[in-house]
Amino acid sequence: MRDTSDTKKSSKRVASRFSRLSLVLAVSASALLSVVGPTHAAPAKDPLPADIPDYQAALSAVKSTDVRNAVCRFLRTPLPTGNAGEPVQMIPETAEPCQDLPVFTIKDPVARNEITPEFVAGTARPLPTEAVKLTQLVSSLSTTVNGRNATVMLAPTQGGGWHLAGVRDGDSDAVYAGKATLGTLVFTEPQIRGWYQLKLSTVEPLNEQAREGLGGQASVSLSDYQKLVKARYADKLPGSEYDTTGYSSGYDLRHPAEGPSPSPLLLAGGSGTALALAGGAAVLYRRRLANTR
């Protein structure tokens, strides 16, 4: 008969080996995680948005010295009053435009989506991929500067990348565009400054203009929303009689994909008036509205 004391000693030795092995595995796993990071925890840095092309170029643009200086010049210049006939204010070139201004950063850009002309005309199907199109990227400031905020607008550059298209007073575009979540899409109906959230095939308003655009309804199907915008704008698209007779510039999403402009317009709020950088052509920008007149 086998000595039970030997069996007990053997069991203790095996248990001790497993205990030491478990400790080694735990330490090894800990060291590995310290190098590659936890497999389930959120990464230290968010991944680049997959739905925005050349996003790294957009990040580089909003963090660039040129864009920051443009924002500082904009913030230093009083806004136009919007009175008819008021000349465009020229923003003077200065060596240190950000000097003496409060410290701020420009946030990472987010997608600014708009309804497509084909969706408005009724030639596109009521599907998210055909109803909405990425037209610009927008970034707001990390804090107000002398009581003002601003939105940096980036436009796509021909051949890839992004460039500064303008700076708008206020941050509403960036705030609403930033409400997009996983599984939802945020877009604007620019003619009425309405912002909407698209969940699968349901359109919900995000601001008062959008609620009015839906006739006060809490939500509508994408198909019903298409009927609403078609009724509002289909006869006002570029080339329409409404457009060609001079009542409106029409409804056009075809932003020119040009290279970086040396003198981008610095747009002032929703007034439609503009500030322009000194050294460039003085141009008065007025937002194209397709409102019925």
Image (cartoon, rainbow, N blue to C red):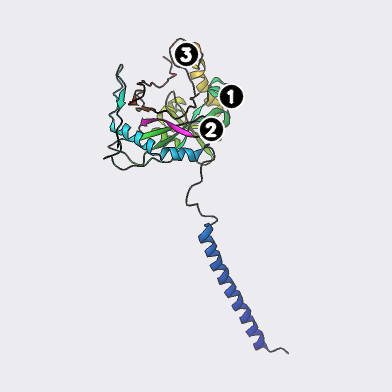
Foreground pick, 94 / 276: 94
- Write down the residue under mark 1: 124
Say which quarter of the image contains residue 32: bottom right
Which residue is the extreme one toward the right?
1
- Label 3 or label 2, whichever lies nearer to me, is 3
Instruction: Determine whether label 1 and label 3 are within 8 Å by CB.
Output: no
Three-letter amino acid code of the residue under disc 2: Thr
Q: Is residue 108 above or below residue 250?
A: below
- Of all residues, the one furthest to the left in this rendering is 100
Identify the mark nearer the N-term, 3 or 2.
Answer: 2
| Residue at 45% across, 35% down | 177
Residue 8, above or below 158:
below
Q: Residue at (52%, 33%) from the top-left corner?
A: 160
Measuring from the top left, give residue 206's x and y in whole percent. Answer: 44, 33
SS type, badge 3: helix
Where does residue 240 sit, x and y in percent of width and height?
Answer: 51, 13
The answer for how far apart the CA atoms under marks 3 and 2 are is 31 Å
Q: Residues within 10 Å of mark 1 (few under 14, many from 20)?
A: some
Q: What residue is disc 3 on?
A: 243
- Within the image, what quadrant is residue 23 found in? bottom right
Query: Which amino acid is tagged 3?
Result: Asp
Q: Is residue 171 visible?
A: no
- Discs 1/3, front: 3
What span is colored magenta in the figure?
A: 154-169
Q: Residue at x 43, y 37 (%)?
A: 61
| Residue identified by numbered label 2 | 202
The alpha-carbon separation of the residues under discs 1 and 3 comes to 21 Å
User: Is residue 164 within the magenta segment?
Assistant: yes
Give the Cα distance between marks 2 and 1.
17 Å
128 inside magenta stretch: no
Q: Quadrant of the C terminus?
A: top left
